[in-house]
Amino acid sequence: MDYTFQFSEVLEDLPYLLGGAVVTLQIAFIAFWGGAIIGIFGAIAKVYGRESVRRITSAYVIFFTNTPALVQIFLLYYALPDAGILLPPMTAVLIGLVLNSGAYLTEILKAGVISVRRSEMEAATALGMSGLQILRFVMLPHIAKTIYAPLSNFFIWLVLGSSLAALFGVEELTGRAINISTTSFRSIETFTVVAGIYVILTIIASTSLALVGRWAFRVKAKIF
Amino acid sequence: MFERLLEEAPEFFNYHNMIFILEAMGRTLSMTVIGCSVGLVCGLLIAVLRQSNSRTLIPIKFIAITYVEIFRRIPFLVILFIVLFVIEPLMPGTSLLGIATVAVCLLSTAFLSEIIRAGLESVPPQQIEGAKTLNFSFLQTIMLVMLPQAWKVILPPAAAFIVMFIKDTALASQLGVIELTFVGKMLVNRGFSPMLGFGAVLICYFILSYPLSRFSEYLGKRLASS
C-alpha cells in the first residue's frame, strides 16, 4: 500500500476554496439571522402566547428539530415544483436552513425570555428606571448570560451544517472541494485541506464570539 | 398536486415498498446505535483520560484533546468523504454502511467525550479532594464518586445528541448507503411524486427521533429537580 500525498494541486486552488469559505459563512449568517427573527417571535409566542398559538409554535419546533434538514430541503427542492414553485438551489437551501434554525433558536431564545423574572422588573420600575434602562440593565444581562453560549455554539453548528448545501450544487466550501476532487483526483488531500479550513474557520468564529461576549455582555464564554 | 398524491398512494404503500423503507430505517438506526455506543465508550475513555493528572499520560492526553477539538469542528459530510477515501484503498470491499458507521463513530466519540467531560466536571472538587483523603485510587474516584453523580448531567444532553445523529446520518445517503434518505431518493427516481417519497421519509425520521427527544426532555426535567 503506497500512496504519495500531493498537496500541491490542492494548494494551488486554495484561493478558490477560501472563496467557498466566504460563501459558507454567508449561508451560516443568513440562516442564523433569518432563524433569529423566527426565533424571537416563536419564543415570545411560546411564553406569552395563547394556547392555540403555543400549540402551533410547538408543532413547528417539534417537526423541524426531529427531522433532518437534508430531507426538508429535498422536499422544498423537489416537491415544490409540482406545485409550480421552482426554487434555485441556493434559495431552497437558505429557506430550509432558516426554517430549521428558526426552530432551534425558538427553543434557545425561549430560555432567555424565561430567565427574566417578573419581580426583578418590578424592582427596577420601583427604582424609577425607564423602559430602555430596564431593557439595558435588567433584561439584557440576564438574557445574554443564559443564551449567549448556546447561541454561539449554534452559529458554529450552522457553519458546519451549511456543508449540506454542497449536495444541491451550491458552491460553498464543501461544494468547491467536491469540484476540485473530481477534476484532480486528489480526494484525500482536498478533503483534508478543506477539513483544516473548517477547523480554522470555526476556531476564529468561536474565539471572536467569545471575545465579543466578554466585551459586550460580560459573559464568561469559554473559548475552548 | 394533491390529486396526484391520492392517485399514487395505493401503489406507493404496497408491501414491497414498506419492507424496503423499514429495512432502510433499520440501517439508519443501526448506524446511529453502533456509532453512538462506540462513541459513548471511547468518549468516556477520553473524558476519564482528561481527568487524570498522570505525567506519563500527557502525550496521549494531548492527542485526545486535539482529536476532540478537531473532529468537533469538521462537518459530518467532510468526515464521511475523508473516511471513504481513506478506507476505500486501504480495505477494498468494505461496505458503504461500514464506512458510514466508522464516520459516525469518529464524530460521536468527539462530541460525547465533551458531554461526558462536562458531566464529570460538574462534580464539586471538594468531593474529589475528599476521595483523595480517603485514599481512593484514580479509578475508584471516577467509578465510585464522579460517575454516580455525573450521569444525571450527562444523560439528557447525550440523548439530545443521539437525536442529532439520527438526523445527521441522512448525509450518508450521499455515499450510497441505502438508508432512509437514499430510499426516499430511489422511490422518487422510480416515479413517485417527491412529496410522497420524501414526505414518507420525513415521517420515518420523525418516528425514530421524536420518542428519543421526548425522553431527553423528560430526563432533563426529572433529573434536574432531584
Image (cartoon, grey):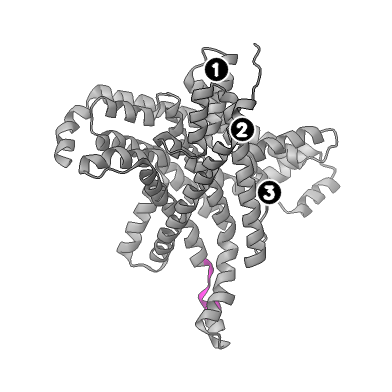
User: In front of the other: label 2 or label 1?
Assistant: 2
Q: Is residue A177 above or below residue A108?
A: above
Q: Nearer the viewer, residue A119 or B142?
A: A119
User: Which quarter of the picture shows residue B202?
Assistant: top left
Q: CA distance from mark 3 to mark 2?
A: 22 Å
Residue that badge 3 annotates: A224
Q: Secondary structure at mark 1?
A: helix
Please report, as a chain letter, where disc 2 is located.
Answer: A
Q: Which residue is mark 2?
A: A193
Quick check: marks 2 and 1 in contact, CB under 8 Å?
A: no
Query: Observer-nearest residue: A104 or B15?
Result: A104
Which chain is disc 3 placed on?
A
Return the residue nearer the eye: A201 or B17: A201
- Which residue is painted at 54% across and 37% down in the image? A16
Q: Where residue A171 sits: x, y (%)?
A: 46, 38
> x%, y% of residue A106?
44, 58
Answer above or below: position of B210 versus B10. below
The residue to which callout 1 is attached is B88
Between circles 3 and 2, the one closer to the viewer is 2
Amino acid type, mark 1: Glu
Q: Quadrant of the C terminus of chain B?
A: bottom right
For the record, the magenta segment spans A115-121
B213 within the magenta span = no
Q: Three-letter amino acid code at disc 3? A: Phe
